[in-house]
Amino acid sequence: MTFTVGHAVMLTGRGRQLLSRGREAGGGIAGKGGGLYAWRVGYEQPVLVMFHGGTGEGPAERMMARARVAAARSTARAALAAGFEAVIVATDEPGAFEPLPAGVLLDVDPPGEPFVYRERLGRLIERYGLERPAVMGSGSVPLLGPDEFALVVEQLQARDARFVTNNFYSADLTGWTPGSAFARLGAVPRDNLLPRLLRDEAGLAPVMLPRTTATQFDLDTPTDLAVLGLVRGVDPGLAMAAGEVAGLTERLRGVMPLLCDRSAELVVAGRVGSQAWQYLERETACRVRMFSEERGLATAPEGHRPRSLLGFLLEEVGPERFFQRLAELGDAAVIDTRVIEAHLGIAPTREDRFQSDLGAWEEVREPELRRFTKAAMEAPLPVILGGHSLVSGGLMALNDAAWEGR
């Protein structure tokens, strides 16, 4: 069944039940001008809103888009099983989600309109009458299961004004009540800023989810997808998607024994948070040489000039000698390359970044990143490249898999 609410909305399962309830409550179908339909209904119980779009057209980008759809399907099932009343997927790729699972509504981006996060989310909250919304991206926290989502539901059903999130400073999942509090916020350029804005501008009380592998792992890059290929019990759809990066998964598998080896040393560089650092100190057998730099890079104020110690070394000696020196510091290296890119002042395309993560330096067009990636693949030690999730939930998941496989 398809209706239009200012633009296309596809309903199935609970969505149809919702429409029926909306009519009984007087919401009805209105606004039939030009063949467009609209209605106003209200969700009193928690509803999960997932955004999926702007995924790109490069080969690696399309691969990651397919993986994110698989993650969204898995997440929707977990959220509904945990007590969410519905899941709304806001997307510019409606065909990617067919067939729709029961309980999932598809809200299609208006064609030709630029995507503005605050406006898009605000319209969704108003259109569906969301009193207890939770918001995330399609690749966010893909290891979160019904038990973790049940904690979110429990917090959102509380009577007092509050929000719940997996990361206060750079959120991947944020839910809050009342939903109307969103209207008090000013500019909301991206979802990872929501916790601070809900506290500072809407006056809501914060509730933090426990920091675990499941709450800290994100599916942002091909390296994250390769990590999922090593996780036991992962959703079958995600396992199938991870099959597309089998070569990178094997490279990760080669590093795993080091995590359980007291004589080994691992170099970790990038936006490593204190929680991940503590986890590695507590849960790995190897020694860890840590370079934690540029925390909060994605949410840094305008005019911030990123600087990296490893970036300075790279500039001084070049990529080839850089990795030779790195080999003197450890038996393998895990690097969040976005910090080095920011230090160098380069802005590779997302496709270039993904190809670099895959180690496919021949496919990288940005000259400096291409040379860096080639040197990494030819380095005298194993080098794993990725983004922020790699040096947080990614390493945590990799270590869990390493010990489980012993």
Image (cartoon, grey):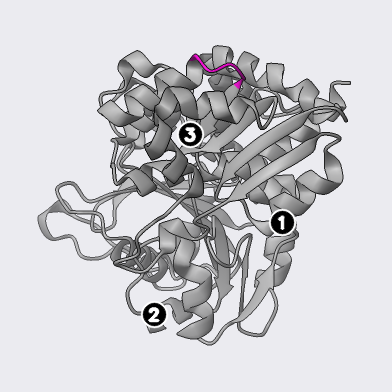
Instruction: Name the residue tied to disc 1.
Output: 275
Task: Please tell me whether mark 1 sits on a helix, a strand or a loop.
Answer: helix
Q: Position of residue 398 (x, y in %)?
A: 71, 32
The stretch of residues the image draws in magenta is 378-382
User: Crowding near pointer 1: few (<14 within 10 Å), some, many (20+)?
Assistant: some
Cα–Cα span, label 2 and label 3:
30 Å
Q: Is residue 238 visible?
A: no
Q: Please tell me in which quadrant of the rendered image residue 44 appears.
A: bottom right
Residue type (three-letter) at the residue carrying disc 1: Gln
- Count numbered badges in the picture: 3
Residue type (three-letter) at the residue carrying disc 3: Thr
Q: Is residue 304 visible?
A: yes
Instruction: Name the residue tied to disc 2.
Output: 185
Task: Please tell me whether mark 2 sits on a helix, a strand or a loop.
Answer: loop
- Which quarter of the figure is the C terminus placed in? top right
Q: Residue at x 60, y 37 (%)?
A: 74
Q: Residue at x 25, y 65 (%)?
A: 30
Cα–Cα span, label 2 and label 1:
29 Å
User: Crowding near pointer 3: few (<14 within 10 Å), some, many (20+)?
Assistant: many
Q: Residue at x 37, y 48 (%)?
A: 343
Q: Are marks 1 and 3 in contact (CB under 8 Å)?
A: no
Q: Is residue 334 left or right of residue 59?
A: right
Above or below, 329 relative to 179: above
Numbered label attached to residue 221: 3
Q: Earlier in the sequence, mark 2 or mark 1?
A: 2
Q: Is residue 350 left or right of residue 279?
A: left
